[in-house]
Image: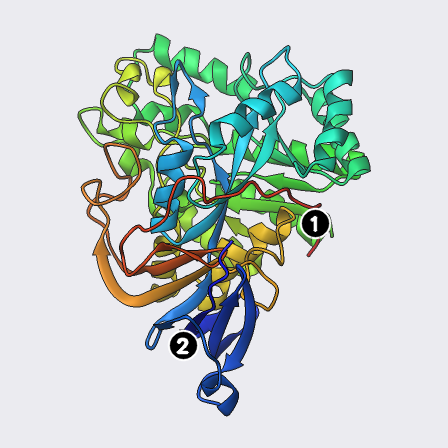
Amino acid sequence: MSSTRTLIRGGLVVTAAEETHADVLIEGGRIAALVAHGTAAADALTADRTFDATGKYVVPGGVDAHTHMELPFGGTFASDTFETGTRAAAWGGTTTIVDFAVQSPGHALRKGLDAWYAKADGKCAIDYAFHMILSDVNEKTLKEMDVLVGEGITSFKLFMAYPGVFYSDDGQILRAMQRSAANGGLIMMHAENGIAIDVLVEQALQRGETDPRHHGEVRKALLEAEATHRAIKLAQVAGAPLYVVHVSALEAVAELARARDEGLPVFGETCPQYLFLSTDNLAEPDFEGAKYVCSTPLRPREHQAALWRGLRTNDLQVVSTDHCPFCFTGQKELGRGDFSKIPNGLPGVENRMDLLHQAVLDGHISRRRWIEIACASPARMFGLYPKKGTIAPGADADVVIYDPAATQVISAETHHMNVDYSAYEGKTVTGRADTVFSRGELVIERREFVGRAGHGAYVPRGVGEHFG
C-alpha cells in the first residue's frame, strides 16, 4: 500500500452524484480529502507529489462487472490472461473487474472458484473480484452458494442458453433464485431460450446458411425477450432480485421496464457492442463478420435507440463489456463453414470508458450518468460501494485523470488487449485516460504504463444494493 501523499489539483471531479472543482488528496491508498479548488484550505494542502489536472476530469476508476479472462469456450480459451486483460483495462481507465469463475458440471463450486483464484493470483495490474457461474444446480451446490456468499462471492450466473454446456432448466433456476433470496446473493441471468435457438441453428445449417451473419439471425430478439420475461417471473415467484446480463434487444428492454414499473427488483446491463455495433458488422464479407460473433448477438441498428433510452430512464443500470476476446486468426476461424463453431465473444475492456464518454459528447447520456453506469452502479449492484465507484473520503484511491479533449483512433495496432483485431477499428473518439491510480499507486502515468502484475488485489464483495 502506498504511504505517499498525492495531490491532484485543479480538475473537475465528476461522480454519479455531483460535479465539483476540487483538489483530491490521496493518502494510504485511500481518498483522504476533497477540498474546493482555489480556497485557502486547498492551497494549504501538502503532498509528496502533485498532479495538475487543470482542464481535465478527475473520475472514479471504472468498474467492469462482466469480464471473461482465460475463459475456456468452444475448444479454445479467451486470449487475454488476467495479466494482459487487467493491464488493458487500466489503459482504458478501468480499475476493478469482476470476472466469472466457472463451475464444471459434476464438480463442486469450490473447485471452479479455486481454479480462478489460481489464474488471477499475482497476475493482475488492478483489483478484481469474482462472480460464480453455476452450471450444475443441485442440493450440494445450493448449499455451497451460502458458503461463497460468506467469502465475498455474492453473485451467481445462470444460463438459459447453451444446452449441454451451461444450461439450467426452469426448476434449477427457481431453486437457485430461492437460495439467493435467502442468502442475499444476486442471480445474474443469460436470458436467451437456448433450447429453441439450437433448433434454429440446426435448421439454418441444414439449409446451408453457414456465414457469421446467421448467428444473429437464429438467436432471435423474441427469444431473448421470452427468456427475459420468464426469468423475471421465476425471480418474482422466488422473491429474489434479478440482474439480466448483456441486454441487446429492444423487446428485452421492454420486459425489464415493465417489471420495474411494477416495482420489482429487476436490473439490466448492456454492453458497448450493442450500443455502437449492429448486424451490419456481422454481415461483413470474407468471414470478417466472425469478429463480431457474441451472445446475445448484435442486433439491427434500430435496437440501439431503445438501449440508450433504457440507460437514460434507468431501466438499464450498468454498462459492462462482457470482454471475452478470441483472435480472428486461429480462433474465430474455427467457425469457417459453420457459424455455430465460432467462439462467442469480443474484446472491449479497454474501450468502454472512452466509448461512453463519446456517448456523452453525442448527447446520449449526461456526464454524471457516464460515471453512474460505468463506475457507481456496478459497484453498488455488486457490493463494492463505496470502496469502489466514487471519489469520497475513505474510498479506495482508484482515480483517473481523464482528458476529455484528447482524440484517439481505436485500433488493434495501438490497443493493449491480447487480441489481433479491434471491434471498433478506425473509430475516432474524443476523451481518454491520462493518468490512472489504483489504491493510490500509479498504474498509468501520462499515457505510460508504470503498473505491475500482482499489484491488483482480490476484493471480497458485500451483498449488493438491489433496489431503485
Residue denoted by label 1: 466
First in sequence: mark 2 or mark 1? 2
Please say whether residue 29 is visible from this viewpoint.
yes
Indicate the position of residue 206 as horizontal and vertical percent values.
Answer: 36, 8
Q: Quick one: which residue is furthest to the top in this view?
A: 206
Does 6 sit left or right of 435 as displayed? right
Indicate the position of residue 209 as horizontal and vertical percent values.
Answer: 31, 16
Q: Residue at x 29, y 34 (%)?
A: 418
**Mark 2 Cα shell of 10 Å, populated few (<14), some (14-19), many (≥20):** many
Indicate the position of residue 323 as horizontal and vertical percent values.
Answer: 41, 37
Q: Residue at x 35, y 54 (%)?
A: 355
What's under tag 2, amino acid-wise? Arg
Residue 18 is labelled as: none
Quadrant of the image for the C terminus? Answer: bottom right
**Mark 1 Cα shell of 10 Å, populated few (<14), some (14-19), many (≥20):** many
- Looking at the image, is 30 positioned above or below residue 99? below
What's under tag 1, amino acid-wise? His
The mark lying in front, picked from 2 and 1, is: 2
Q: How many marks?
A: 2
Check the image and tell me how it is coloured: rainbow
Name the image quarter holding residue 111: top right
The one nearer the camera, 418 or 41, is 41
Indicate the position of residue 297 as horizontal and vertical percent values.
Answer: 41, 32
Q: Residue at x 73, y 28 (%)?
A: 145
Helix, strand or loop at mark 2: strand
Residue denoted by label 2: 9
CA gap between label 2 and label 1 equals 35 Å
Helix, strand or loop at mark 1: loop
The one nearer the camera, 97 or 428, is 97
Q: Quick one: which residue is furthest to the bottom in this view?
A: 40
